[in-house]
Structures are given as structure tokens and as C-alpha cells.
Image: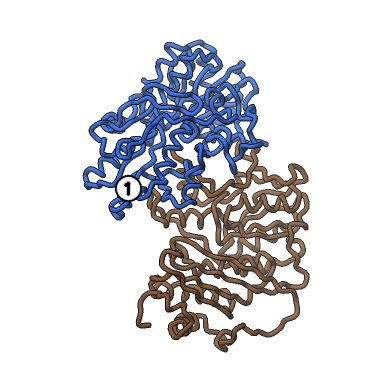
Amino acid sequence: MSQDRILMSHGAGGLKTYQLIKEIFHKHFANPILTRELDAGLFPGTPGRWAMTTDSFVVKPLFFPGGDIGKLSVCGTVNDLAVSGAKPLYLTSSFILEEGLPLIDLEKIVASMAHTAREAGVQIVAGDTKVVEKGSGDGVFITTTGLGLVPGEIDYSPQHIQPGDKVIISGPLGQHGLTIMAARGNLPVTSSLVSDCACLHELLNPLHSPEIRCMRDPTRGGLATTLNELALQSGLGILLEEGAIPRDPAVEGLADLLGLDSLYLANEGKAVVIASPQAAPRVLAQLRNHPLGRQTSLIGEVTGEAAGQVLLQTDLGTKRVLRMPAGELLPRIC
Amino acid sequence: MPKEVKTVPDLIKRIKEKVRPVRFMEVCGTHTMAIAKYGLREILPPEIELLSGPGCPVCVTSQGDIDLALELAARPGVTLFTFGDMLRVPGASGSLESVRAQGAKVHILYSPLDCLQYAINHPQEEIVFLGVGFETTAPTVAVAIEQALAHKVNNFSVLSFHKRVVPALQALVSGGNTAIDGFLLPGHVSSILGREPYEFLAREYNKACVITGFTAEDILLGLLMLLSQVENKSYRVEIQYKRGVNPEGNPQALAYLAKYFTPVETTWRGLGPIPESGLGLNEAYKDFDAFRRFSLQLGRKEIPTACSCGEILKGLKRPEDCLLFANQCTPLEPVGPCMVSSEGSCAASYHYRR
């Protein structure tokens, strides 16, 4: 590449577009399906049910401790497949590039995507690139679509949740959300936070059993929002035990200072598993046995009371409601 | 106070032994949130009624002041920096969030010092910091002005709506408000002010007073100390939050306040205008005063709503008594600022009610 920034001509469909695709995207994403350069990726048919999902990524800054927008765009979609019970197989990626983006940054992002996809065992089989004028974007926006295969007996759904089921979380909360806030550089503290951004299918796929009712990855809105959704969708209540929720001291200290609650902060490498009481001990042991699930904890259970609500039993024995958040998380004044 | 009483069950037991029908006001929004978060009302005897006072800076910012900020933010060339809570507070014609969507430049920050670097990097823009808060926040604004002077930053100013806690408490009690038996006084503000400014509450108005910290144990111990004062009719200002508050306050912060600010009359939402209850910029720093820099006029008309924020802030009503509560007024579509701020008494009641 002779130019060191994205130009409008990179999106014009001519030679520069072709160069960009060959020299950055194909170079890093290389696989037999992609390199045939067809208008659609063709891959072998497999018996079973397909799971398909899509997600857009607009994170600022593009690079942050623990990851970057490229890694995030793979993990986010892989995780949506994984919590649906699917083994992730294929991704497509669509890039909106802002004019002026340094090519070196784009290549770093693409290389990071390729690395993450390779580690996860998924292939990026199709893609697209568009360039928008400077000021019309924010560096890079990425949309990924994922395709995965669901084993025959698996059917995770909030409809299967029953009173008495256990609520399990795979680790402490809020690391991604607070890391991003801190990485934006306007927090009054220097922090040692690292995003938890990670692909979860190797953690979650081995759990497969009908005794698992449902799984979710608590991203935007955090654990509180995810559990509220499950309570509404299942028509049941959820009672959490405050003292059982695993905490990252670095997150809690800073969140406390800012008046934020880690239960509402985003995660990118955590899963909530709702399992039958019989399966819960096995699920706990299996998750804790994986590096991404060392701090897995049983944090509460599903109840027939308080339908549609999430209650938190505090350390003092009192109960309060954890509600859906109203809007973006805003730090307080004093 | 007995030192051996430390745990929550112990404290509750002692409180139950001493309890009588009382109404205590927690002045500070952080106390309001902590009481709701720990679910303390559930374990306290029903004889103790806790009221939320005027100690959430967002809640007491008047509609007229918000409108002024909206007008300024919409001016070409102006970039307004604000703490996050203020973003959704409704004025008569929208909120900072809605003018931002219409193209106004509004940024969230965590410290007033953050906008100085922005001002240096954007010399063609007028950078205005929306100064909302009590004596805890104002000293950091003073430091920002000091830094702006030192670095000759000429495109930075402060729209100061800062408020002083003590004149508001004076206004609450001097109106013959007998609904309140005592005050849980704010831990953070008191770490700046110290004990002396509150003494009149005990001396002249027979109100029990305890400067209190923010853990469940702190708050329960504060309540126990208030009950003891009421029981013995020995009204004074005690400090429960000794690890955070020196009796004489923070002399350095007080010196900054005295040097950069001067007490001015200001309007509190719900309480109306209170003499000397605001902090305006001193004459010597008028170049940094957004009111003068942009020739802004205070005292615009407020459009009345059915919102009961005023009576709630005075301790005369509870959030649930307001006609709008949880109907027309919710965190998603707040009418009054007590519902907007995470520390507002209405938001606390809404989020943690069952």
C-alpha cells in the first residue's frame, strides 16, 4: 500500500478497493471459501439446525486494554451463537471506514479479527467495505454476521425456565464497560482495568444438556438488564444473593467512585447460565475448570413469586428490586 | 456513643430500644441512595420516618437555570461540558440530551480540569463548564480557573450554579418547619465545611444533628446517635463520620472557595430564591464568568408543572405522594429532576420500591 490512510477512492469499487481487499482483508482472513472470491461464500451443507445472528460494533476508542474493535466484533457474534447452544462456524464482516483512517490501524484491527477467529475456529467467509467522508463515521464501524450449528437435542429458551432453577454467572461483572469508559481518557483516575472481551463457545459448548434451560451473555445493560429480560420472557421472578455475586475489586472501587453499579455495566466475556437444580453443581464445576470461568458462582435462583422482577437480597437480609436501566449510564456529580 | 455497637443487628437492636416516633431528614443524595440500596427502611422500626432533603445538586437546580444552560449550549461556537447527571434534566424546552441531538456541542466530563485541555486544543471554540454541585465540587472548579489563568487559557468559562448547603438548611428550619426532628448531615460536604456551620440547627432550632458516613453501619449509627439526642433533648452537632470529617473542615478547600467565589442569591428548585445560597464567581475572575462573558440574564419564568419536587425536598411529601410519581414521571421520561438524578429521592424510591 503506497497510501497510509483510507481515501474515498478506497470505497469507489475500482483498483484501490481491489487492492485494499487483497492486501488487507484476504491477506489476514485467508481461507478456502473466501479466497474463491465469489459474490457469496459457498460452504458444504451439514445436517442439523443453523443458528444465525448479527451485531454491529461502534466502540470508541478502537483500541482498549484487553482488546480492540476487531476482536470485539468476532467475540460478540461468536458469543451470541454460543449462548444459543450453537458451535460457531462462519462469520461475515462488513466494514464502514471513515476517510482518513490510518491504514496501519485498519490492518491492526483486521489482523486482530483474523487472530481471534482463528483461535475460535471460525472462518470469515464473506465481507464488504464502504468508505464514508471524514466526519461521517468514527474511524471504523464493523458488522459481523455469524452462522453456527446447534446439536439436535439443544433448545435453550427462557420458556424452559422453571421455579427453583439456579442462576450461575461465569465471573465478575463490569470489566468491559468500565474499561471502555476509562480508556476514553476522561476518568479522574488511572486504572488498571482490562476488558473481559473473549470468545465463550469453548467454555459453554461442553455444557450442552437439556438440564440447561437458557444462557445469555450480559453485554450492554449488564447482568441486571439480562436477568430482567429473562424474568419478563419467562414470566417468573429471579432472586439474587448480593454476597454471592463475584466482584472485581478494581471495577468495584472505580464504579463506586463514579456512582455506577457493576450489575449494570457491560461485559464481553461473561455468560449467565440458568440450569436445573440437579445440573447446577456439574455446571459450576465444569465452568470453573475452564480459564474463562474460574470465578463462576451460583448467584441466585428462579422463583414463582414476583413474576417479571429481579430482586436482590442484600447482605443485610433486605430485598430490593433491580430494574431495567432508563438510558445511558451517567456518572454522578458528588 | 457506645463503641462496642458495630454490627447491623446490634445497631438495629439498639435503635429499637430507643425508638419513638421521629422524622429525620437525610440531607445528602448519596445518603438517600445508600438507604434505598441497603433496603434500610425494611429493617428500621416504622416509627422512624426518613425524609430526603435538598442535598442532590441536580434536583435543586431550577428549571430557569437549566433553560439558561440550554440556551447557551445552542449558541454557535459554544461547547458545553457537564457532569453526566445533568444531561437528562428537563428545562422548559428540552434537556441537554435533546439539544445535543439537535447539534449542540455537549460533552460529559468527570472533572472540570478535563475541559481545560480541550479548550487548549480547540482555541476557536468557547468552552463553558456547567458548574453544578455543592461545596464539594466548587473547589475543583476553583482549581480549574487557577490552572486556566496559569496557562493563559482565554476560551474557558464557568456557568456557576453551585450551591451552599447551610443557607438551604437555614431556609428549611426558619420557615417554622417542625416536621423534622433531626438531620443526618452530609459526609462529603462536611469534610469541606467542618462542624461549626451547622451549630445553629441544634442551638437555635433544637434539631438533632449527626454528620454521617455512607455505609449501612454508618447510617444506622448516625440514626442511633440522633435518637439519643432526641431522647436526652441534648441537641448538638456530632460527627459519626470521623474517618472522613475533621471538625474544622478542609482549610485548603475553604480557602479556594473564599478566593474564587462569593455568596450570591440563587433559586432552588422547590425552595425558591434563598439569599447567599449560591456561589458566584468573584469580581477578580469575571473573565471566567459565563454569565458576564455571554451577557446571560438570570431570573427567567418557570413553567409550573404538577411535580411535587418542592414539597418533597422540604420533607413535606414523600415521592409516592406526588401525583406524577411512576405515572407521568419515570426515569425514562422524568418531569422533575428528583427523578432524573441517580441520587434524587424520586429516582431512589422508584428504583428500589417493590
Please name the residue shown 65% across and 41% down the image: A321
Establish if B103 lies above or below A49: above
Most foreground residue, B207 or A147:
A147
Quadrant in which the N terminus of chain A is drawn: bottom left
Provide the residue designation for mark 1: B126
Chain ID, blue in image: B
Chain at numbered mark 1: B
Which picture quadrant has residue A139? bottom left
Residue B172: tell me if it is visible: yes
Q: Residue furthest bottom?
A: A36
Quadrant in which the C terminus of chain A is drawn: top left
Please name the residue shown 57% across and 84% down the image: A34
Q: Residues within 10 Å of mark 1 (few under 14, many from 20)?
A: some
Give the x, y percent position of residue B72.
Answer: 39, 42
Q: Is residue B312 left or right of residue B162?
A: right
Please tell me the colour of chain A: brown
